[in-house]
Image (spheres, rainbow, N blue to C red):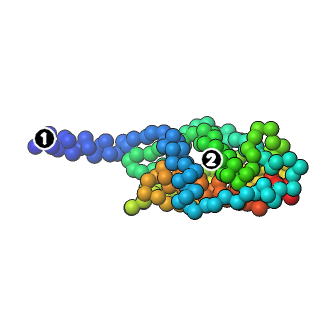
């Protein structure tokens, strides 16, 4: 009987302690363009056909996120997952670059069209049957003095997938934004 009581107490104490892990790689694994574009029924438009630029329209996406300390991005008590904001933005930029390429916008470091991006927040929280996720990013285009934020709430059965869904939605908002398009397409 004492062993059972001790086991129950130990189980209770372990549930209070919880476990913290890094989850950026798991979120990045879910940022699969072909799966997400299909799930959201996204058919990228050929933006280059509207370009008034002298050269092929191009863009350079720059990570301006300076935070390198981990923060809690996924909460599923008693477990939590941490991400590094600067590294997360590098993964988001890779996904965003793919989206621009799908719209026939060349992504290159030599482009004079520069968009700076940083993360404001990324959070997934366990609900009763699914995870709710929130992503908020900020872009700056110094050349035209444009600063904008984009945000999305999304849900999925898994926290990593919910985060990827929210990231996908925000990157599509950036690509589909008329002000961003006009800047890249020289209009």
Query: Residue pushed farthest left?
Result: 1
Nearest to viewer (mark 2 / mark 1): 2
Q: Where's residue 92, x and y in %?
A: 62, 46
The residue where tag 1 is placed is 2
Task: Residue 65 in the image: state x and y as whole percent.
Answer: 68, 42
Q: Secondary structure at mark 2?
A: helix
Question: Mark 2 = which residue?
Answer: 95
Relative image position of residue 179 (x, y in whole percent): 79, 59
Mark 2, other Cα within 10 Å: few <14 / some 14–19 / many ≥20: some
Q: How far apart are labels 2 and 1 at the CA level?
A: 55 Å
Residue at 70%, 41% in the rendered image: 63
State left or right for residue 32 relative to residue 78.
Answer: right
Whether residue 133 is visible, yes or no, is yes
Q: Is residue 149 visible?
A: no
Does residue 16 lie above or below 133 as drawn?
above
Q: Earlier in the sequence, mark 2 or mark 1?
A: 1
Query: 37 above or below 115?
Result: below
Residue at horizontal 70 percent and vertical 54 percent from the top: 103
20 to 103, vertically: above or below:
above
Q: Callout 1: helix, strand or loop?
A: helix
Instruction: Name the residue nearer the viewer: 178 or 51.
Output: 51
Q: Position of residue 174 (x, y in %)?
A: 70, 56
* Quadrant of the rendering where the N terminus is positioned: top left
Image quarter of residue 71: top right
């Amino acid at each position: 009987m004492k062993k059972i009581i001790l086991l129950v107490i130990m189980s209770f104490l372990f549930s209070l302690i919880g476990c913290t892990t890094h989850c950026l790689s798991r979120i990045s694994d879910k940022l699969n363009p072909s799966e997400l574009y299909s799930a959201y029924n996204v058919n990228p438009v050929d933006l280059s056909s509207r370009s008034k630029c002298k050269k092929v329209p191009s863009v350079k996406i720059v990570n301006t996120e300076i935070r390198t300390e981990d923060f809690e991005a996924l909460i599923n008590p008693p477990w939590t997952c941490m991400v590094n904001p600067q590294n997360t933005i590098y993964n988001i930029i890779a996904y965003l670059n793919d989206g621009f390429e799908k719209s026939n916008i060349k992504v290159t470091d030599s482009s004079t069209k520069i968009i700076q991006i940083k993360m404001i927040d990324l959070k997934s929280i366990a609900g009763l049957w699914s995870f709710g996720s929130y992503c908020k990013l900020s872009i700056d285009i110094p050349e035209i003095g444009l600063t904008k934020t984009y945000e999305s709430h999304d849900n999925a059965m898994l926290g990593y997938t919910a985060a990827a869904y929210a990231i996908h939605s925000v990157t599509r908002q950036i690509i589909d934004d008329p002000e961003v398009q006009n800047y890249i397409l020289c209009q």
